[in-house]
């Protein structure tokens, strides 16, 4: 069975500090991986995705993620966070039409 | 990516009434749309897969007679919560499968349903 695990439910970080949100996947087949951001009372916005090719993926808002097959990870990083990055972040995987989501990581940027 | 809208964004209704939520794909013809439910501080739970021109596929534990889905065109899917009760209060989000082999899903802004 395929699954995605987000290891941290809450991550507080000071403004302008770097952040890493962790995501591990479990899949016996090739998998596509995604990071989405959700602001309060809004839908999900695609940050970035890994389909194939380069393992370092750059997304919007200065975020990037690295696909690591040996560690089955797809951690999200940003070198310097802003207050506006405070939101819920979801890692997701897909092997076909259906998505499977992680439980989410709440990122809080502290001024 | 595809642009997806939902209407209404927020609805409050009395217990026992039915509520219809629309999901529109504004710039993409979507043969497949998905409906999710999200409780506070939780992840998204897939409710059903909406297929244009055919019956929706419901996930285990989701009552098809309670949550009626109609996907009559390539740009519109509707979710009707019939005889709503307070426990149906939730955030409902639809998404469109981007197609083209990318498996990317694009999400609507969500609908907040509150049943009194």
Image (spheres, coloured by chain):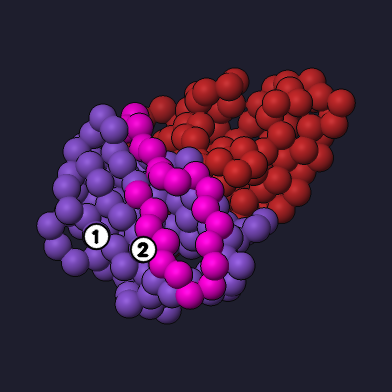
Category of crowding for the residue at label 2, using alpha-carbon neighbours closer than 10 angstroms: few (below 14), some (14–19), many (at least 20): some
Which residue range is magenta in the image? B1-22
Q: Do the CB atoms of the residues marked 2 and 1 lie less than 8 Å apart? A: yes
Q: Which residue is mark 1?
A: B70
Q: Is residue A77 magenta?
A: no
Q: Is residue B21 magenta?
A: yes
Q: Colour of chain B?
A: purple
**Who comes first in sequence, dot 2 or dot 1?**
1
Tell me what residue is drawn at x 35 percent, y 49 percent.
Answer: B22
Q: Secondary structure at mark 2?
A: strand
Tell me what residue is drawn at x 42 percent, y 79 percent.
Answer: B61
* Residue B28 sits above or below residue A92 on the image: above
| Residue A26 image position (x, y, % from top left) | 48, 59
The quarter holding residue B48 reads bottom left
| Residue B20 image position (x, y, % from top left) | 37, 58
Q: Secondary structure at mark 1?
A: strand
Q: In this rendering, does residue B107 appear at all? A: no
Give the letter of the chain under mark 1.
Answer: B
The dot on residue B80 is 2
Gap between marks 2 and 1 measured at Cα = 8 Å
Q: Which chain is red?
A: A
């Amino acid at each position: 069975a395929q699954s995605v695990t987000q290891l941290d439910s809450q991550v507080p970080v000071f403004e302008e500090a770097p952040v890493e949100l962790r995501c591990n996947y479990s899949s016996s087949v090739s998998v596509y991986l995604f990071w989405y951001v959700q602001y309060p009372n809004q839908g999900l916005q695609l940050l970035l995705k890994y389909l194939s090719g380069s393992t370092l993926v750059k997304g919007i808002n200065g975020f990037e993620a690295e696909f690591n097959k040996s560690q089955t990870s797809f951690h999200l990083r940003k070198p310097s966070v802003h207050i506006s990055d405070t939101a819920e972040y979801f890692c997701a995987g897909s092997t076909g039409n259906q998505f499977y989501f992680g439980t989410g990581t709440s990122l809080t940027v502290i001024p | 990516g595809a642009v997806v809208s939902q209407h209404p964004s927020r609805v409050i209704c009395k217990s026992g009434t039915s509520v219809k939520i629309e999901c529109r794909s504004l710039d993409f013809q979507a043969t497949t749309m998905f409906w999710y439910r999200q409780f506070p501080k939780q992840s998204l739970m897939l409710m059903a897969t909406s297929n244009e021109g055919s019956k929706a596929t419901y996930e285990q534990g989701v009552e098809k007679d309670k949550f009626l889905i109609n996907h009559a065109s390539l740009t519109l899917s509707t979710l009707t919560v019939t005889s709503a009760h307070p426990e149906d209060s939730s955030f409902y989000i639809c998404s469109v499968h981007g197609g083209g082999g990318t498996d990317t899903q694009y999400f609507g802004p969500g609908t907040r349903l509150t049943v009194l």
